[in-house]
Amino acid sequence: MLENLWILSSILFLFFTIFLIKWNFFNPKTHKNSPPSPPTFPILGNLHQIGLYPHRSLQKLSHQYGPLMQLHFGSRPVLIVSSSDAAREVMKTHDLILSYRPEFSVARRLLYHGKDITTAPYGEYWRQLRSICSLHLLSNKRVQSFRAVREEEVGLLVENIKRQCYSQSLPVNLSDMLAFLTNDVICRVALGKKYSRDENGKRFKELISELMKLLGGFYIGDCIPWLAWIHRVNGLDKEVDKVAQEFDKFLDGVVEEHENKFDTKGFELNEDRMDLVDVLLQIQRDDKMPGFSIDRESIKAVILNMFVGGTDTTYTVLEWAMSELLRHPRVLKKLQNEVMEINNGKPDINENNIEKMHYLKAVIKETLRLYPPIPMLVPRKSFQDININGYDIAAGTMIITNAWTLGRDPKLWEEAEEFKPERFLDSSIDFKGQDFQFIPFGAGRRGCPGTLFAMAIDEVALANLVHKFNWELPHGVKAQDLDMTECIGANIHREVPLLAVPTPRF
């Protein structure tokens, strides 16, 4: 008995000694004038204070410690930005210094080791890739060239809803339908065809889901490196490798298919009919960028970016917009009246008329204010010591801007928690990165390059949904009782699918 107690005591003493050593070595030393910070816990730092909904937890902490707050995620120093003035410092004043990305092990392995535009280290490679996206892939001209794809896929969505209306009286699952819409649009735009209906398409959709789940997860090894072995034990490393290899195999097949098409037809493709793989292969073959060549790995990384950055974020906006419209019948009716009037009562939406639909744009802006698709913007990292608002920020600090907090700050917005699209009707505030109280897509060099593309889908889809149908909540569900719980993850979807009852208007 005494021998067992001695062994147990020795083990506890050993663990306690290791604990103290790790704490002394890995607990970051405070900078000379660091921002306010909550007390840290040994080894964990402030990780125990984050919770299941980090954007909400960080908002509460910022109320106590201020708009610039220093945390520690394990051994990693993190600056939390929760005010428009601080966001302007990060994304405008110090944009260059803070244009680097922190490294995350899972994202690096899934996204071709930093060859994609989102996670690529700031430098010449990233600048050239950003230029390709801005000039060739996501320019206004290119976005407009995909108008027929958007209109056709939204038309199919409308017909699908009508079929369900006539075949059954049950509510439709709008969440699923909107997810299929954005996935199909992006598949056609990026890959040239849809991957959603057959068995291969089913597996592709599952792969996208698995990829997004992995990218949105929290991994202890990124914050406490000496615990990275846990990822091998719990099967995470194996799962990441499996998804990465399967996605790579799929994208290899897509690129080869397009290369064979080029070999057969040369470059006589109609530019308006070129998908994004076509465009990237043409750039590769023309070699028009001096000192820079885009290889197959880069092509696959950029295409994967289109799905990671475009699928979930785009349909999330539509899902939350329809949720709020169902909760606010007055707003829904006002929007329907605008669409009907500007479209001259015609049953089919003319996309040219969408530019005149100011209330539609206000509804989408208000949705983005309350529900930014990525509530905490993709983190940045400082590559040198800097001073922000009088505070010293050490090189290597990870910077997280809480866009969700900015959108709900009562100092910036009247009745900040209320859904009121009218606030944007007589306002010049926009989401293009110049108004730092409203940055759902980020700002500066690392702002999202796909904003135009996402908005084009959201606007035409929402206009058609409210124009073609009247909408009600399922029987027995009151507007004030609609479940608006968020899911857990990097993107904030609804936790419960949105069910609604449509009645065709045409």
Image (cartoon, rainbow, N blue to C red):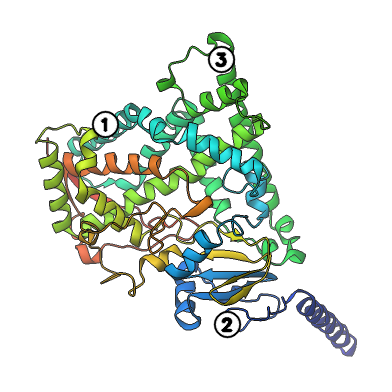
Toward the viewer: 73 or 226? 73
Distance between the Cα atoms at labels 1 and 2? 52 Å
Query: Which residue corresponds to the image point at 39% horizontal and 46% vertical from the top-left?
Result: 314
Q: Secondary structure at mark 3?
A: helix
The disc label shown at residue 38, or none: 2
SS state under label 1: helix
Q: Nearer the viewer, mark 3 or mark 1?
A: 3
Q: Earlier in the sequence, mark 1 or mark 2?
A: 2
- Mark pair 3, 1: CA separation: 31 Å
Mark 2 or mark 3, which has the lower sequence index? 2
> Label 1 sits on what residue type?
Gly
Q: Position of residue 472 (x, y in %)?
A: 17, 52
Q: Nearer the viewer, mark 1 or mark 2?
A: 2
At 73% from the left edge and 61% from the top edge, which residue is drawn? 228
Identity of the amino acid at label 2?
Answer: Pro
* Quadrant of the image occupied by residue 469: top left
Q: Amino acid at mark 3?
A: Phe
Q: Is residue 486 left or right of residue 349?
A: right
User: Mark 1 = which residue?
Assistant: 155
Q: Judging from the image, what secondary structure is the residue with disc 2 in?
A: loop
Instruction: Give whichever of 110, 450 is nearer the camera.
Output: 450
Cα–Cα gap, marks 2 and 3: 58 Å
Residue 276 x/y as whole percent: 49, 29
Residue 262, disc = 3
Q: Indicate the quadrant containing the N terminus: top left, top right, bottom left or bottom right.
A: bottom right
What quarter of the picture does the C terminus occupy? Answer: top left
